[in-house]
Amino acid sequence: AQSVAQPEDQVNVAEGNPLTVKCTYSVSGNPYLFWYVQYPNRGLQFLLKYITGDNLVKGSYGFEAEFNKSQTSFHLKKPSALVSDSALYFCAVRDGYGNNRLAFGKGNQVVVIP
Amino acid sequence: SQTIHQWPATLVQPVGSPLSLECTVEGTSNPNLYWYRQAAGRGLQLLFYSIGIDQISSEVPQNLSASRPQDRQFILSSKKLLLSDSGFYLCAWSVTGGAGPYGYTFGSGTRLTVV
């Protein structure tokens, strides 16, 4: 079965500094990978996805993520963090065949310090 | 375009009272539907998922149940709430067949507090 690991509970970053949220995955076949963001008392919002093609994908709010097949990683990045980026971030994966449900990571709390 | 509605946004219920949370999807047919619970603002726990009317799978045994009386309606229920049922409940949908290239779309959530 597919699985996702988000090793850090919380990521603290100063405003204006680069932001990275780590995600590694385990699947059978080629993965579909997703990042979602959740603000307090709100549902999860889609940020970006990797299905196929370029390893670097760009998404909403200036976020991007790099698919690395050899390292089975899909880290989320933003070159310059904003205070408004403070939120909970979830990585999710489904495998290329078989189980077609998403497996979510535990989530990473990002705190951007002014 | 597709939209998902979830209500109520907040709910405070006494222990032992019944529960009914509703989720509806518009603009699509035969979606897969999901109920998640999120405790303390962290990880998502899948409670139920449905691939069609009256076709529901339970992921976690507990005093909650789900029903899908119509194609785009998904209801989470309980006959008697426990304190441990408190949490943030999220409904989500995906295209027929599961999480295709578009992943899941989530509702805005219901904050349930059992007192």
Image (spheres, rainbow, N blue to C red):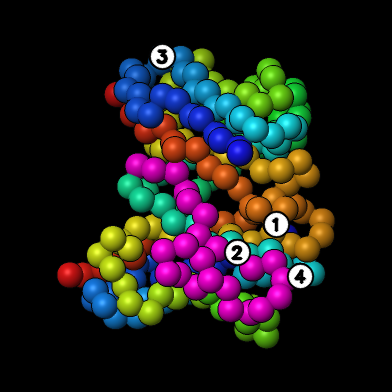
Q: CA distance from mark 1 to mark 2?
A: 8 Å
Farthest bottom residue in view: A70
Disc 4 to disc 3: CB gap under 8 Å? no
Is tag 4's residue or tag 2's residue first in the polypeptide sequence? 4
Q: Are marks 4 and 2 on the same chain?
A: yes
Is tag 3's residue or tag 1's residue first in the polypeptide sequence? 3
Q: Which residue is mark 3?
A: B17
- Residue B47's x, y, as percent? 58, 37
**Badge 2, how many Cα within 10 Å: few under 14, some, many 20+?**
many
Q: Which residue is mark 4?
A: A30
Q: CA distance from mark 3 to mark 1?
A: 40 Å
Q: Is residue A107 left or right of residue A54?
A: left
Q: Are marks 4 and 3 on the same chain?
A: no
Amino acid type at circle 2 is Lys
SS for callout 3? loop
Mark 4 chain: A
Circle number at residue A114: none
Residue name at image x 55 percent, y 34 percent? B4
Mark 1 chain: B
Q: CA distance from mark 1 to mark 4?
A: 12 Å
Between A65 and A2, which is closer to the camera in this rendering? Answer: A65
Q: Which residue is mark 2?
A: A49
Residue B22, placed above or below residue A109: above
**Front of the two marks 3 and 2:** 2
Residue A74, placed above or below residue B38: below
**Front of the two marks 4 and 2:** 2
Q: CA distance from mark 3 to mark 2?
A: 41 Å
Q: Is residue B54 left or right of residue A107?
A: right
Residue name at image x 41 percent, y 64 percent? A61
Farthest right residue in view: A98
**Badge 1, how many Cα within 10 Å: few under 14, some, many 20+?**
some
Amino acid type at circle 3 is Ser
